[in-house]
Amino acid sequence: MMRRSAALWVVAALAAVATVALPAAHAQAPAARSFDVLQLNLCHSGSADCSSDGRAVDSAIALIQQRRPDVVTLNEVCASDITRMTSETGYLWEFTPAGDESTGGPRACRDGRGDYGIAVLAHPDLGAGGAPIERQYAAQDATTEQRVLLCVPFSTVAACTTHLSATDARVAAEQCRELSGVATALNAETVVAGDFNLVSGGSPDVQECVPNGWYRKDDGSVQHVLAMDVFHFRRAETLPVDGSDHPGLLVETDR
């Protein structure tokens, strides 16, 4: 009887251990969270035919407030636009002016609205960004506008934007390859968005500058979002932007 009781005690103990261990064996991975990127070209230098006396900025603010993307990338904006947009949305920001070859300084918007360039806005949940990477491209076209790139590292992700040459597709392709090299060297989960002035299936083809392990989504034209494949693509949507000749491009992902 003593031997039988001991055997039963061992069986009960093993069963208890198995019961305790079972939840650990079935522990679930952390749920993926959404990560959305909104690309906007606001055509707001004041010198282009598509400029609209601020309507595009109004429209951009409304889209950010409605959709609350994690990252907003902006092209053809003025420094004063960014001041207003961040004040009204609460987003963090980095701005880089395009260069002006004729003056050797930053390119300016008309009507005293400050420098003209590109920007990255970030939802406050991303936290303050680290030191940005700002660079004029080695390849430039024959116009006086010197095209630039901007990358901003945040605590867990990085975001880059650019506006590539509009007059020379070969130069735009060289700039795109330089941008890809900078983005892949960031050692972070990274998204890139902007107006590349290149199209899928064109000559040169924008797909040629997409790094290995990344994917690309577009607005059906020259605006693109490139993302590392850790950002699991869900859907893309084009959104009307009043006062701009470009729609907004919203790419929704999970990471």
Image (cartoon, rainbow, N blue to C red):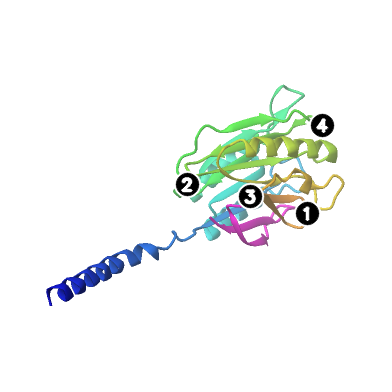
- Residue 220 in the image: x percent, y percent? 77, 58
Residue type indicated by callout 4:
Thr
Disc 2/disc 4 C-alpha distance (Å)? 37 Å
Disc 4/disc 3 C-alpha distance (Å)? 30 Å
Disc 4: CA contacts within 10 A as few (<14), some (14-19) or many (>=20): some
Q: Earlier in the sequence, mark 4 or mark 1?
A: 4
Q: Is residue 32 above or below residue 136?
A: below
Name the residue tied to disc 3.
Answer: 227
Q: Which residues are magenta?
A: 227-255
Q: Judging from the image, what secondary structure is the residue with disc 2 in?
A: helix
- Residue 46 in the image: x percent, y percent? 71, 41
The foreground one among 97 and 48 is: 97
Q: Earlier in the sequence, mark 1 or mark 2?
A: 2
- Mark 3 or 1: in front is 3
User: Mark 2–mark 3 contact, CB under 8 Å?
Assistant: no
Q: Which numbered marker is on residue 221?
A: 1
Q: Earlier in the sequence, mark 2 or mark 4?
A: 2
Name the residue tied to disc 4.
Answer: 143
Residue occupying the point 57% across, 55% down: 36
Disc 3: CA contacts within 10 A as few (<14), some (14-19) or many (>=20): many
Q: Is residue 15 above or below residue 66?
A: below
- Mark 2 or 3: in front is 3
Name the residue tied to disc 2.
Answer: 126
Query: Magenta segment: does it hold 240?
Result: yes
User: Mark 3–mark 1 contact, CB under 8 Å?
Assistant: no
The foreground one among 1 and 173 is: 1
Residue occupying the point 73% across, 22% down: 103
Residue type indicated by callout 2:
Leu
Residue type indicated by callout 1:
Ser
The foreground one among 181 and 62 is: 181
Disc 4/disc 1 C-alpha distance (Å)? 22 Å
Q: Earlier in the sequence, mark 3 or mark 1?
A: 1
